[in-house]
Amino acid sequence: MAEKEDKTEKVEKKRREFIQYSTLGVLGLVLGGGVLASPYLNPHETRLRPPGAVDEHTFLGLCIKCGQCEQVCPYHSIHLADIFTGAGEGTPYIDARERACYACEAVPCVLACPSGALDHSCEKATDIRMGIAVLEFPDSCIAMSNTPVPKKHIQRMHTHPNTRQLEQDVLDKVDAFEGKQCSMCADICPLPNPMSAIAMVPDKNGGRRPEIYDGCIGCGVCEEVCPVDSPAIVVKPRLTYEDYYEKGIRS
């Protein structure tokens, strides 16, 4: 009887080991295949890439996932993609709603890139071309409805990493808008000449609305600071002003 139970336990142990290693093997093949294939996967990219990023297909092939751009970003803007964020695991991207690119004049992320995935010809803020801002949801724009900037949305920005003076300077600008007429997207635009990119213009309903110009670099600051639950203004990655506003290409 004891011998029979011993054999049963051995069979059960082998069965568990088979399931365990088979599962690990399949998972390894899936993950390995994803890593090997990632340079060749070229879906329509919906994430913002850092300043200077070359076209998406070339970017996925050149980026060595070293994380140098993330480390030198003074605003904590750059993240590295994980296995759940689509093609290009380990490649850098920016979530504008969480923390946009503040268009550093020296563009340190580009300087830090050793592979050419971030093109070194991008030498200053006005060279950056990440995408284009769009007033996607005008009904949510509180500037158009003359609604004062609510405190809760200013507090939202205080929950992000804020360990450097540059970041504190942004918070100081944001805090000054509490209870006032909103023009945050235009007034906090980080470009040396923000009116080349965005300005508040009169709206037919009596408020004001943001208007986008061809100087927009798609940094995403307007999306980050938009003081509503879901931003009224968003950035379309990889598109230019001509693409969206003149050719009518929609992402």
Image (cartoon, helix red, strand yellow):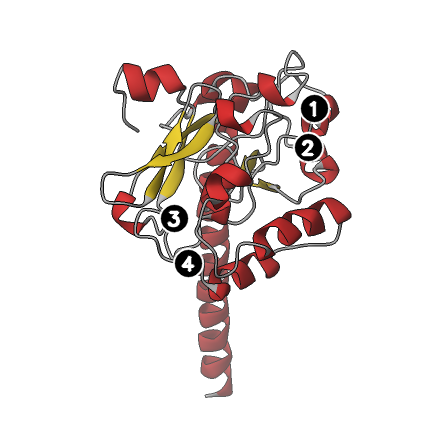
Out of 244 and 63, give the one closest to the viewer: 244
Q: Could you say which disc has been placed on residue 113 in the image?
A: 1
Q: Which three-letter amino acid code belongs to the residue tagged 3?
A: Pro
Q: Which three-letter amino acid code belongs to the residue tagged 4?
A: Pro
Q: Secondary structure at mark 2?
A: helix
The quadrant holding residue 134 is top left
Given contact means CB atoms under 8 Å apart, are the residues at marks 1 and 3 in contact? no
Q: Which residue is mark 4?
A: 148
Q: Residue at x 23, y 44 (%)?
A: 205
Given contact means CB atoms under 8 Å apart, are the residues at marks 3 and 2 in contact? no
Q: Which residue is mark 3?
A: 231
Circle 4 Cα neighbour tier, 10 Å, few/some/many (<14 / 14–19 / ≥20): some
Alpha carbon separation for disc pair 4 and 1:
42 Å
Q: Pinpoint residue 38: horizontal percent, then vertical percent.
A: 48, 29
Q: In which quadrant of the rendered image does the N terminus lie?
A: bottom left
Alpha carbon separation for disc pair 4 and 2:
37 Å
Q: Earlier in the sequence, mark 1 or mark 3?
A: 1
Alpha carbon separation for disc pair 1 and 2:
6 Å
Which of discs 3 and 2 lies nearer the camera? The answer is 3
Q: In which quadrant of the rendered image does the C terminus lie?
A: top left
Q: Pinpoint residue 142: horizontal percent, then vertical percent.
A: 35, 52
Out of 90 and 145, give the one closest to the viewer: 145
Which of discs 4 and 3 lies nearer the camera? The answer is 4
Q: Does 96 appear above or below 33?
A: below
Q: Which residue is mark 2?
A: 69
Given contact means CB atoms under 8 Å apart, are the residues at marks 4 and 3 in contact? no
Left or right: residue 164 versus residue 148 is right
Given contact means CB atoms under 8 Å apart, are the residues at marks 4 and 1 in contact? no
Left or right: residue 126 versus residue 185 is right
Given contact means CB atoms under 8 Å apart, are the residues at marks 1 and 2 in contact? yes
Q: Farthest top residue?
A: 121
